[in-house]
Image (cartoon, rainbow, N blue to C red):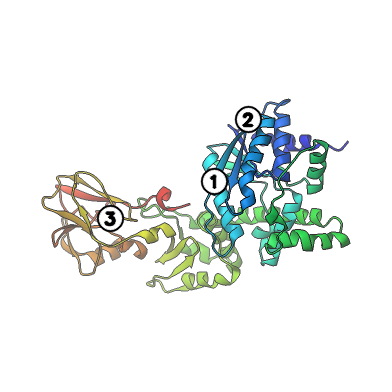
Amino acid sequence: MKPSLAAKLLHVLSPWRNAPAWHVAFSGGLDSTVLLHLLASLANTDTLPPISAVHVHHGLQAAADAWPAHCQSICDDLGVSLRVKRVQVHPGASLERAAREARYQAFIEVTGAGEVLLTGQHRDDQAETLLFRLLRGAGVRGGAGMPAQRPLATGYLVRPLLDISRAELEAYAGVHQLNWIEDPSNADSQFSRNYLRHRVLPILAERWPQAASSLARAAEHLSEAQGLLDELARQDLQAADQPSPFPWLHLPSLVLTPLRELSDARQRNALRHWLTPLTRLPASDHWASWLSLRDAKGDARPLWRLADGDLHRSGERIWWLPSTWSEFSDMSVSWPDPQNPLELPGNGQVKLAGKVPGGPLAIRYRRGGEIVEVSGRGRRDLKRLLNESGLPGCVRGRLPLLYRGEQLLGAPSLAGLWPAPSDEWQLHWLPQTCDQGLS
């Protein structure tokens, strides 16, 4: 006997039964309405985590103003609590993308540690996704479609209906006499996904009735292939992911030499895996910049600009600097109370240990030609000290220098790379941490 929709859902969600809470992304449309009804019904017969719903109001069309009330009515009937999150959509090149980013930011805000956000995408949505991405020239990762599960901040996003067709959801809604919202924008074929849904997939289904199912199955195969590529990437990154010589510098980095020993295809695969949590990945024709960075002379300082930051090379190591580091300002910062740490714009903080030097103090940055006093070595050229230390070039311009008026008192001791400038006091620099600057 074919299992019921409720039985299928319960089976798919079995790994998440011990989660602290389940949140349903509830648009009020067919998919999320069926999902919420199924879960509320199952909660009457099975022990499930606490279930709640979250409705995101984008404010993009007048019709949407009535949707929160509709969703509230459904939730009241089912005995499920509802949170309505109103978001601001900042459209760029793609309104769809901007709305999606705003929506998922709202989901992150409501999903606590270990909690699960459940969304209603189904098999037909997966087929659309695959077709849409293939038409944009996607590779294996893009062709894998929407994952059935993935991390979402400190929780998880789970799509439990990916093996269910829209026809099955409509049949369930009919049997249970469910009412749902029809978003007028879903009929607008100027949006690419709607064009595929209303104009392309129906024609494919006329010739190949199982087109949506076959496309979704192809996405599963590509997802498995991507899993194998990820395994290979983790193996290839082991040799390159060596501890940084600057553990206080909280930036992801890799040793370049082990990467060079790989084929170009394996280099790209390893870097895609490493970069995925850090930035949106570049298009295929943008990877020539990786070759330029990789093959630059050792004394060069090449960089590769990506969507959410820059990849820098310093000697035989590559460093990731997130876009938030571009907020750094090299303007002088006065230090009115040296007894307390000083926050530096886009550059972490500095603090003084020991006896605080007298006089009005300020933090400035390198302009060239600086000479610092090094305990046991006398006056030394700062540039030469930095060259000896091997500090990445992309960080040297951020090195905070302590001044009293026009007198340079010293630079941070940088975790013992050179001795502190004075036996009486030390300047400590705490650069931005991963929490401050990395995704």
Residue at which label 3 appears: 417
- Alpha carbon separation for disc pair 2 and 1: 26 Å
Residue 246 quadrant: bottom left
Residue 274 percent location from the top left of the image? 53, 56
Residue 303 percent location from the top left of the image? 44, 68
Residue at which label 2 appears: 49
Residue 83 quadrant: top right
Q: Is residue 129 left or right of residue 330?
A: right
Nearest to the observer: residue 77 or residue 308: 77
In the rendered image of this protein, does residue 133 appear above or below residue 111? below
Residue 285 percent location from the top left of the image? 58, 72
- Alpha carbon separation for disc pair 1 and 3: 50 Å
Q: Amino acid at mark 1?
A: Arg
* Comparing labels 2 and 1, the label whose residue is closer to the camera: 1
Residue at which label 1 appears: 86
Residue 253 percent location from the top left of the image? 44, 57
First reached walking from the N terminus: tag 2 or tag 3: 2
Q: Amino acid at mark 2?
A: Pro
First reached walking from the N terminus: tag 2 or tag 1: 2
Q: Which label is found at residue 125?
A: none
